[in-house]
Amino acid sequence: MFSKTLENCTVLSGGEEYDSITFDENIISLGGKEKGNQVLDMNGAVIVPGFVDSHMHLYSTALKLMTQDLDGLSRREVLLKLTGAKPNQNGWVVSRGWDESLWKKQEFLTPDEISNGNPVLAIRVDGHMAVLNKKGIMESIGLGLHVESDGVIKEGELDKLMSRIKPSSDINEAIMRAEEYCLSQGITSISDIETPDLLADYRKMQHKLRIVFNPIGLHRMGFNTGDLVSENLYMGHVKLFADGSVGARTAVMSDGYRDSDASPSLVYSDSQLEALYSEIISSGNDVMTHAIGDVAIDQVIRTTKKFDKGRLKIEHNEFVLPLRTEMEEKGMVVSMQPNFLRWSFKGGMYERRLGSGYIGLNNRFGSLLKNGVKVAFGSDSMPVGPMYGINLAMKPPTSGQKISFDQAIKCYTENSAYALHLEGITGMLEPGKKSDIVALDRNDLSVLKTYFEGVEKYSSH
Ligand SMILES: [Zn+2]
């Protein structure tokens, strides 16, 4: 393969800085004298490893690119968009991303105010709940699903509805668009959490980046964690849920909620969760478990402690109170989302739901890293794009939790690669690793170029 040298740049590698990098499919040298066949003047760019998103949903990202994105809009704008929205091939309007915590009237949408002649499913930004319009309620009930009195549909019922009404148009094309979008954000590997049926579709595709596929729930997939399933497609962890989200008031917190008398319970009892871990681990797979509330996190740590094998992950790990040394001792990997700091500021959603005492107690990246916990960063597709989360982690609501640019990059590359069992392949810029390389503008840190295994897959101009 044709080799390249990027020069006039700052290459960040394992705490060191170099002024050039030479590579073909693999990295050849850093700051070396030999030059590649092609030499590029990078005009002072910052060169980092390709980002590894440790928790995302490629298919919902694809849907988001195909359906209406309501993220960041005011209540009025959301309602206007829903009114004018056209249905998909299944006759449904599916929109996602509304976030009432940004609105003056901080209340969920209601069925009555969504006027559209078609059934409408409006999914909240966290993906754990949605509101239906009246027609949507009728159709959902007709499908045998449970809808709450205020038109809200949550968690498992929402997943069932989604699998019935997803646009049957070309999944391949949608996924390819989402992969290209990831590359434009500097992402070269992802940990993709999906319903197991999607694996068959994924296996037929030519992926543009590295995908680690994590099926939701215990299913016989025929592959073990770490297996290469097809080109650029690996088997990941089996995904379980211990609780839900703070936004949907389904995260299990020991103090409950301040703004509601909701009292969600854990998805599994201790013995059920342990039995699931046992079965998954003994069949050659690792487990990743969603846990956001402190009660759920405690349960996952308690369960993990009973197993010696595997690279077991906690997903989100938001309200870990107090910091648990077991995480370090057991070599647990925590996969967290700096993006979620968007709800952590004073007056933000976490304070309203849980009280001001919780402001400094969620997403404590500074404390976790200081305690030697391996923190992997991911976006949870809210939104996809590492720089959004990295900027928040560098300027968090609680100054004591601030982390440096270098630390944030390490979480989003080296640590995430480890979480995905990809540390032998990517996550660091060192000779021998695959040339997954991102060039960032030195002023605004926007993505200038993305190389995947040495091939330029994105350029900003
Ligand atoms: Zn997720």
Image (cartoon, grey):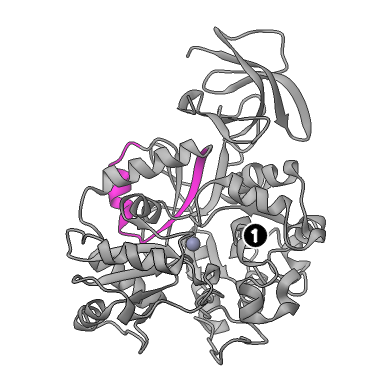
- The residue that label 1 is drawn on is 334
Seen in the picture, residue 370 relative to 280 is either above or below; the reply is above
| Relative image position of residue 106 (x, y in whole percent) | 52, 77
Please tell me which residue is depicted at 30% across the width and 72% down the height of the picture: 160
Question: Residue 287 versus residue 25: which sits nearer the camera?
Answer: 25
The segment highlighted magenta reads 187-206
Q: Tag 1, which secondary structure? A: strand
Q: How many numbered circles are shown?
A: 1
| Residue 133 image-quadrant placement | bottom left
| Relative image position of residue 283 (x, y in whole percent) | 46, 62
Look at label 1 and name its amino acid.
Val
Disc 1: CA contacts within 10 A as few (<14), some (14-19) or many (>=20): many
Residue 411 is left or right of residue 233, and the answer is: right
Residue behind label 1 places its C-beta within 8 angstroms of ligand 1: no
| Relative image position of residue 414 (x, y in whole percent) | 65, 42
- Tell me if residue 431 can be seen: yes
Residue 256 is left or right of residue 224, and the answer is: right
Please tell me which residue is depicted at 56% across the width and 44% down the height of the picture: 52
Q: Does the magenta portion include 378?
A: no
